[in-house]
Amino acid sequence: MVKQQMMQTYTALNQVLGAAFGLSLGLTLSVEGVSLASGYSDAQRVLVAQTSSEGVAALTTVPHLTQRYRSEGDIPSLIQPIVAQVVVASEPTGLVAEATSPEARSPVASSWQTEPVATIPIRPDRIGLSGSGQRLMTLDDEGTRLQIWNTQTGESLMEKVADDGTRFDAAAISTSGTQVAVITQSLPEHDLELSLWDIETEERLWRRSLGSAQSPFTDDHTFFLEPWAQVIFRPSDDALLTQVSLGLDAADRATDWQLRLHDNATGETMQSLVSTAGVEHQRFDFSADGTLLAGFGYIPTDINALPRHVVDVWQLDCGDRLMTIERENDSDLPVSAIGFTPEGYLNVMSQSFYDIQLDTWDVHAGERINRITEIPGIERQDGYNTLSPDGVYYFARSDVAGTRLFNLQDLTVTEINRYADGVVFNATGSHLAITSFDGVEIFSKTDVSD
């Protein structure tokens, strides 16, 4: 039975290769002059397909990234490589077809080092990098231990332990690396407080009340769970952004979202920003000059309906919402990451399984100025998606394809042999911190001046 299934899959795969490339399995062929209009460079093209009882596996555009499909009909049109040679080998698991070229087997030059420059041997829940990438902020999953590290030496520079009856819900390190901001929740009233600390002196500079939290969910110590509590420094460090939820609706969903911009010198509220009604923002990003803020999230809907994905953009000199980007219909892809480019354009990445699109917006004009719909090496399980602040790289991790950095300009891929469950870039995009099984690992570009 297994042999029959293998032969059926082999026949189907043979038909796919024959229709697409004029090739037949069982032969060793050299094919030249094949050109398919996929927009990828020749050096990136490689197709590996394996038949087995688990189905067809296909690796496209980048060596060693394997994607599995139940049948040839599930293989997306993205798989249009240039084939230089087909080799068939007999293995216990089935029949293997491999189309390669010398160029495809050669490693692509990358701007990123694939081994960490430093490793901090802890497994935190949240991380942050200073602007230079030389200082790392870590917050444990219990919300009880906040630490600042030197990423060059691994030395602990500061450690704050939450007092009894308090928990750290969110934290951020400043661009300068000299300050850390913390949102603290205190029992029994679940009061939320923003405080700013000097890293060198470990002195608290000020603290301000943010209100009292409400939630149907508590941890083992009766603290309310505040999954979307956030604090972020503006790139110039002159202000901080906070988001907290202070209410509940009839369905026990978070409401009364408070989004505020605070003066760094005093903690006083400079602006209260208005979001699209009902949206739960998951991530925020400032433009490099600090004049724009973007946030993306979703509006919860009925259980049978898709959530409404929303990107809000604010003009911070006046505090007004400049524009809102929403899914126009159910076929639109859900937003997975946002990020401003150094020029002030907003990149919005959306992905669902193998479908992906990168939209670039001129937010002042309210117009989309570019869209990319094919990025080699995308995998249906990709998660922890993040765009680099320089607008060049897209980070993704998949259980199947692994951890990768996609160059959105030349469509090359850098593989990082780590299982990442958290990621953050520094402000310039020259350093990357990844939480992995080994701890927090710091990666940098080969030329940090890039």
Image: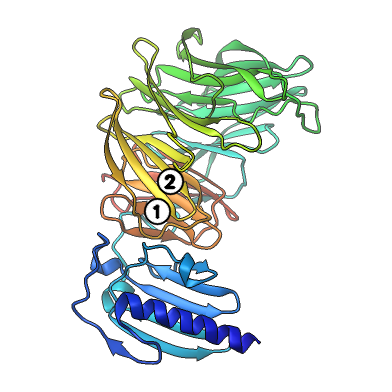
Q: Amino acid at mark 2?
A: Leu
Q: Nearer the viewer, residue 154 or 51?
A: 51
Q: In screen coordinates, is 190 left or right of 374?
A: right
| 329, above or below 28, in the image | above
Q: Position of residue 171 (x, y in %)?
A: 56, 28
For residue 88, the mark is none
Residue 152 appearing in the image:
no
| 108, above or below 24, in the image | above
> On the image, numbered disc 2 is attached to which residue?
432
The structure residue drawn at horizontal position 30% and vertical position 77%, both measured from the top left corner, is: 21
Q: Amino acid at mark 1?
A: Leu
For residue 405, the mark is 1
Q: Quadrant of residue 203?
A: top right
Q: Nearer the viewer, residue 282 or 34?
A: 34
**Quadrant where the N terminus is found in the figure:** bottom right
Residue 425 appearing in the image:
yes
Q: Position of residue 211 (x, y in %)?
A: 64, 11
Q: Identify the secondary structure beneath mark 2.
A: strand
Q: Nearer the viewer, residue 430 or 157?
A: 430
Q: Position of residue 47 (x, y in %)?
A: 38, 73
Contact (CB < 8 A) between labels 1 and 2? yes
